[in-house]
Amino acid sequence: MISGPNYGRNANRAFILSSGTVGAALDAAMAGRKAIALSFAFFERHHSPEEITQACHTAVRTIFNLWDTWTAGQSSSCEVDDSSRADSALNRVELFNVNVPLGAGADPATYLTFAFKDYYNSLCAVSSVREAAVPAADDIKDSQAISSTTSASSSSDVVSSTVSNAAGAARLINGSPCRTVLDFDFACAFNIDPARPAFYGSDLWAVYHRHVSVTPFAAALAEVDLAGDKLAAAVCPFRAPPLETLLEPNPPAEPEPELKPPVA
């Protein structure tokens, strides 16, 4: 199964973990099928027909090369025999994540990469601060902000009470109650430094240099082995013993009864 092409890269961890294109490939891998997620990375929004055609040709060529040499997930059922994959690391791959840069030319280099482990500080940033009129009490009468204790107050007290409970601190501007509204834009601040040694050889490194990145994955979250770690031992003192220690050995065979001569 091939998902994509996604318009925009799916390189580096934050993009991969939030990608619907990669998610579709994961679903196919869970069903025991070959799966490839394809994305077209870009550096500007305007692309010539030639650039799009070149990216498509590169993607098809890359996918065919993978498909012809890849043996994982060939089972026709959801039951995939892992023993048939043990002879090669390639055979243990369950999906590939492929990034083809737009504008990279007719024959960009293809690199086997790993997913760059990036971090971000915030997903959104304040784009504007404005004053907005507070809705009348009748417009928000179903809100939890309207308290039964305000029934004896005047209508202006009802609005004031509603504002202070539902919309935070309000103030009067030209005689009308208003509140401050913050508008947010998506502005994810990634902690990406191309000079970092960990950047070299990653999927993002390849895309950054206008190369094709091919990243192999298994359909599983990565586990961290904490065997022998003191802190882990203090928090989780028990570990499952080796399975062979729980299996009872075969009982010894019953000895043959000794045949004694008959008593005279």
Image (tube, helix red, strand yellow):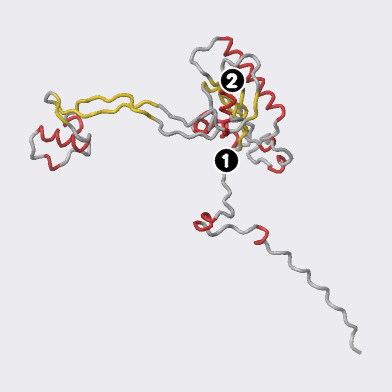
Residue 152's place in the image compared with 5, above or below, is below
* Residue 103 spot, x, y in % from top left: 57, 15
* Residue 130 spot, x, y in % from top left: 25, 24
Identify the image quadrant of residue 189: top left
Q: Element at badge 2?
A: loop
* Residue 115 spot, x, y in % from top left: 57, 33
**Residue displayed at 54% across by 21% down:** 41
Number of labels in the image equals 2
Residue type at numbered disc 1: Ala
Furthest-bottom residue in view? Answer: 264
Residue 197's place in the image compared with 81, above or below, is above
In the depicted view, which residue is nearer to us: 32 or 98? 98
Q: Element at badge 1?
A: loop
Quadrant into which the N terminus falls: top right
- Reading the image, the residue beneath label 1 is 220
In the depicted view, which residue is nearer to us: 101 or 195? 195
Quote the CA–CA distance across marks 1 and 2.
Answer: 29 Å
- Reading the image, the residue beneath label 2 is 210
In the depicted view, which residue is nearer to us: 117 or 1? 117
Residue type at numbered disc 2: Arg
Label 1 crowd bin: few (<14), some (14–19), many (20+), radius 10 Å: few
Quadrant into which the C terminus falls: bottom right
**Residue displayed at 56% across by 23% down:** 208
**Residue displayed at 57% across by 57% down:** 239
Identify the image quadrant of residue 128: top left
Residue 219's place in the image compared with 47, above or below, is below
**Residue displayed at 22% across by 34% down:** 167
